[in-house]
């Protein structure tokens, strides 16, 4: 897939900030249990959740393709091989959508950071797109055994959006936009914990998956993680 060229100077800034170190991802590979969250946004009241289908999943008009976003972090991308998976079909359908959401979340997060860093946090469209992505995932029906996973992923995306909302509100006074400080922001850290928990749930739920799919579990969640 062709990617848009980025200037080397800005790419270095983006790389350093978007995925500062992979130690947190390495920690997640041990498999972590689910956590309780106090600020999980609720799905729309009165609406039944829709069945997961990749055909209705949102794709956003941002400058970076999926491949370019992973390259900007930089991070390996291992695609999930559902054909070789022995998980139930309903789980496959939901996770196909969830992993698409993660890829779109990575595109939005990398693009938003680049725009915020360049323009002084003037990018309302990114925040709107993130909200749409979160709402879509919230209102997608998860199998019972993946409901906690869904909550973790919604939490991670919501916390990452909250980081950018605060940046937009504070603008020049925001203290966490640099590569040196981004990892100390509470929402960045809580999003990282949620992603580690989500990864742990998949590893515990599908222990018999092959090496490719276990690497895919890791890569999707680690690439979405700021840390």
Image (cartoon, grey):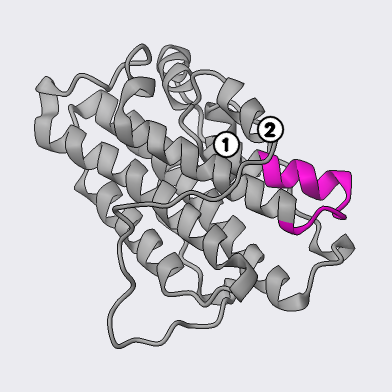
Label 2 residue SS: loop
Task: Residue 195 in the image: state x and y as whole percent.
Answer: 52, 43
Residue 190 in the figure: left or right of residue 96 = left
Residue at 27% x, 22% y: name it: 177
Give above or below for 145 relative to 18.
below
Helix, strand or loop: magenta stretch:
helix
Q: How far apart are marks 2 and 1 (CA)?
A: 8 Å
Give above or below for 185 relative to 162.
above
Residue 178 in the figure: left or right of residue 222 = left
Label 1 residue SS: helix
Residue 64 in the figure: left or right of residue 23 = left
Task: Residue 225 in the image: state x and y as whole percent.
Answer: 50, 35
Q: Quadrant of residue 160?
A: top left
> 200 or 164: which is nearer to us?
200
Residue 195 in the figure: left or right of residue 119 = right
- Residue range (magenta): 205-218
Q: Name the residue under label 1.
A: 223
Please check the rendered image and state whether residue 152 is part of the magenta-colored stretch, yes or no: no
Q: Quadrant of the N terminus?
A: top right
Of callouts 2 and 1, the N-terminal one: 2
Residue at 49% x, 26% y: name it: 227
User: Residue 76's mark?
Assistant: 2
Please check the rendered image and state whether residue 212 is part of the magenta-colored stretch, yes or no: yes
Task: Residue 170 in the image: state x and y as whole percent.
Answer: 11, 30
Give above or below for 133 relative to 103.
below
Could one spot residue 124 in this view of the protein? yes
Task: Residue 226 in the image: state x and y as whole percent.
Answer: 46, 31
Could one spot residue 143 in this view of the protein? no
Number of numbered discs on residues: 2
Q: Do the residues labelled 2 and 1 touch (CB within 8 Å)?
A: yes
Q: Badge 2: few (under 14), some or many (20 or more) residues near its Cα, within 10 Å?
A: some
């Amino acid at each position: 897939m062709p990617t848009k060229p980025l200037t080397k100077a800005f790419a270095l800034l983006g790389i350093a900030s978007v995925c500062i170190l992979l130690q947190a991802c390495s920690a997640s590979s041990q498999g972590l249990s689910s956590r309780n969250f106090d600020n999980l946004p609720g799905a729309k009241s009165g609406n039944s959740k829709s069945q997961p289908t990749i055909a209705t999943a949102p794709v956003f008009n941002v400058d970076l393709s999926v491949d370019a976003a992973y390259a900007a972090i930089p991070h390996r991308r291992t695609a999930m091989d559902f054909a070789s998976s022995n998980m139930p079909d309903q789980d496959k359908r939901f996770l196909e959508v969830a992993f698409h959401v993660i890829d779109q979340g990575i595109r939005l997060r990398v693009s938003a950071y680049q725009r915020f860093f360049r323009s002084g946090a003037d990018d309302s469209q990114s925040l709107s797109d993130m909200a749409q992505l979160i709402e879509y995932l919230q209102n997608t029906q998860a199998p019972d055994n993946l409901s906690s996973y869904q909550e973790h992923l919604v939490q991670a995306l919501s916390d990452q959006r909250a980081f950018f909302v605060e940046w937009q509100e504070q603008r020049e006074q925001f203290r966490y936009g640099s590569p040196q400080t981004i990892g100390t922001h509470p929402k960045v850290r809580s999003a990282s914990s949620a992603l580690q928990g989500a990864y742990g749930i998949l590893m515990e739920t599908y222990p018999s998956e092959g090496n490719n799919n276990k690497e895919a579990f890791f890569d999707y969640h680690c690439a979405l993680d700021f840390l």
